[in-house]
Amino acid sequence: MTVAVEKPEKTDPADAVPTAAPAEPVRRPGRALTVAAILLVWLVLFAVLRGKQTLSLAAADLTDLHRWLNDIRDSVGADRNSNPLFLYFFNEIRLVIDNLVTFVQDLISQPSGDRPLPQIGWLGVVGLTGYVSWAVGNWRVALLAVAGFTFFGLQGLWQESMDTLALVLCAVFVALLFAIPLGVLAGLSDRCNRILTPFLDLMQTMPTFVYLAPLTLIFLIGGASATIATVIYAAPPAIRITAHAIRSVPETTVEAADSLGATRRQSLTKVLLPMSRRTVVMGVNQTIMAALAMVTIAALIDAPGLGKTVMQALQSLDVGTAFNAGLAIVVMAIVLDRVTTAASARAEAARRSDGRFARWRRPLLAAGAVAAVVLVYLSHTYVWAAEFPGEGGAGRTVATTADDVTTWAQDHLSGLTNGFRDVITDGLLNPFQSLLTDSPWWLVAAVLIALGAVLGGWRAGVTTAVCAGLLIGTGLWSDAMTTLASTLVATVLVMLLGVVFGVWMGRSALVDRVLRPSLDAAQVMPPFVYLVPFLALFGATRFTAIVAAVVYAAPVAIKIIADGVRAVPGTTVEAATSAGCTTWQIITKVQLPMSRSALTLATNQGLIYVLSMVVVGGLVGAGALGYDVVAGFSQGQLYGKGLAAGLAIVLLGVMFDRITQAAARRTSA
């Protein structure tokens, strides 16, 4: 038997040479390593070049730009009553807004004509407030509103509270006249949405301070300018949320309406708007909260109300009076927030129900309307129902108690508070501020541009370069770097709190239920209010502004991080647990890495919130750009410098926003 032997195939000699393994792609250094290298180079050059080319400017010095802006102010003032643009446009706008504000003030806060009291006295205002709160919400909210408004009178701040409410109502009314139609248009048109988005981004990035100086140039100081500034600041949330609500309506619902022959107008009024009602009311809520925050800050341009009381008390370091007025602002914010939140829930219930739930309310609401009309009549006719009784004894008690607590804290806690202040100031703030302000301007600009490009991409780098160049042009580079140092230090503290409490809330439903109401309440308080308690603890220093900024910005960062941690799939956490990971390993190796986009978004929002609060801190000794803005209002020769400081604040906000948003997109990609 023969065995067939298989001959080997003829091979090419070249094939006999062992083939090399495919080359591994060359790894680029990670972003963290690149950032570390940039910072190391910066430190080395800082040690060599410290104190050179810092572009410092004394508080009383002006640049050519500042003088030019002063000249513009003078020329505008000289031409205000002769220039057609002012005669037939700006002055007319101011007149309309001023008449609206005066009308509402005559109704509820200021003497009207020959009357020594407003048309509707305190009893009528309380009755109307209770009825409206009940009609749009529920009886619990109505009781809260009645109690809150009565408390204003007990504090001795009835007229100041009504002045603030009048400005808020006027601003919200005008803002919604423009915001709701623009939001609907942006929701229906992609092109309109693309056009509006950059402007809305800029408007929401700008701190409240920044709106005031240019508007006073055009509309002068007073209630009209404050209302116009508030309209501009408060409109973007309503526009965004309305557009989002329209876009969130299911396409199948719209297609069903179209298939039944509905016109575009019918689809809008019968389908889109009714189904978006709850979200649109949430937008109204955000507009009201933004308006209240802006109205209090607008005291800098002579807006009447509680903000003026707080500002005057802060300037004289009268903590008791500031606390009493600040408490009134907090109560007003809580009442307005609860009423609009209840209205949102009511809108959702009305949309889902078949109408039966409202039958029992109609007779009660009719009776409530009659009672409210009777109270309005009484407050219009009789002095006892128009003028709040008493002399504000509760307010004096609150102010005295606040002063006593302040004195006790300064006597017994000064060692602790001063020690904490010194640790943060000497260990973190001063070194970082020195690094920014004592480095050559071109070195800091190069570092910022490089960091922007590394963290956010080349577009963010270009934006940073443009912002840095314009910051140099404002002549306030050194002050901008001081503000930047305070902002970044405060943001680091915010993120530390955000990670600790956010992870805790994200991992525990019980902790979330306990902490979230407090965080929600903290977010409705205007930034002005946060300065008062920390002024009592730390005095008028830049550290006061930093601590207030941390407390102001921490709630939003904590909530974003908590939501990000909670969004990590439970199966992933269970797999890590079954693999033997400890709690610390699960947090650091699984939940936080998978929440990077939430961490970046929290950093973005924290930076913007901190910047706005650090600038407000100019009222309590924070210095830098905030002081420049305040000085521009109070000292005529520094107006141009204050206007340039406002521009510098905008540039810092845009730079922060672009870098962090781009970093968030790269992280989530």
Image (cartoon, helix red, strand yellow):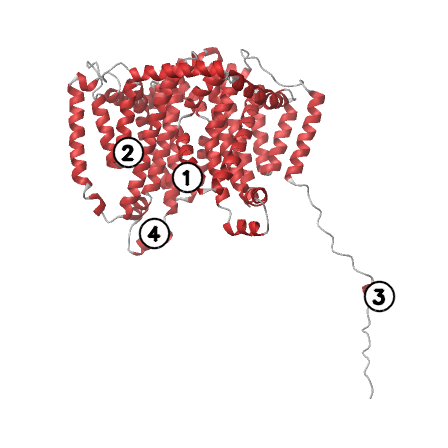
Label 4 or label 3, whichever comes before in sequence order: 3
> Residue 141: which disc?
2
Helix, strand or loop at mark 1: helix
**What is the spatial separation of the Cα atoms under label 3 and label 2, in whole angstroms?**
91 Å
The answer to whether residue 301 is visible is no
Q: What percent of the width, then of the height, locates residue 70?
A: 48, 14
The answer to whether residue 603 is visible is yes
Mark 1 = which residue? 513
Label 2 or label 4, whichever comes before in sequence order: 2
Mark 4 = which residue? 254
**For discs 2 and 4, the disc positioned in front in the rendered view:** 2
Amino acid at dot 3? Pro
Query: Mark 4–mark 3 contact, CB under 8 Å?
Result: no
Which residue is painted at 29% across and 50% down in the image?
263
Q: Quadrant of residue 200?
A: top left
**What is the spatial separation of the Cα atoms under label 4 and label 1, in whole angstroms?**
37 Å
Q: What percent of the width, then of the height, locates residue 590?
A: 57, 45
**For discs 1 and 2, the disc positioned in front in the rendered view:** 1
Label 1 or label 2, whichever comes before in sequence order: 2
Position of 593 relative to 638 (above/below): below
Query: Mark 4–mark 1 contact, CB under 8 Å?
Result: no
Label 3 or label 1, whichever comes before in sequence order: 3
Helix, strand or loop at mark 3: helix
Q: What percent of the width, then of the height, locates residue 359?
A: 19, 44
Amino acid at dot 2? Val
Q: Residues within 10 Å of mark 3 (few under 14, many from 20)?
A: few
**What is the spatial separation of the Cα atoms under label 3 and label 1, in whole angstroms?**
75 Å
Which residue is painted at 78% across and 57% down in the image?
20
Q: Residues within 10 Å of mark 4 (few under 14, many from 20)?
A: some
Where does the N terminus fall, quadrant-wise?
bottom right
Label 4 or label 1, whichever comes before in sequence order: 4
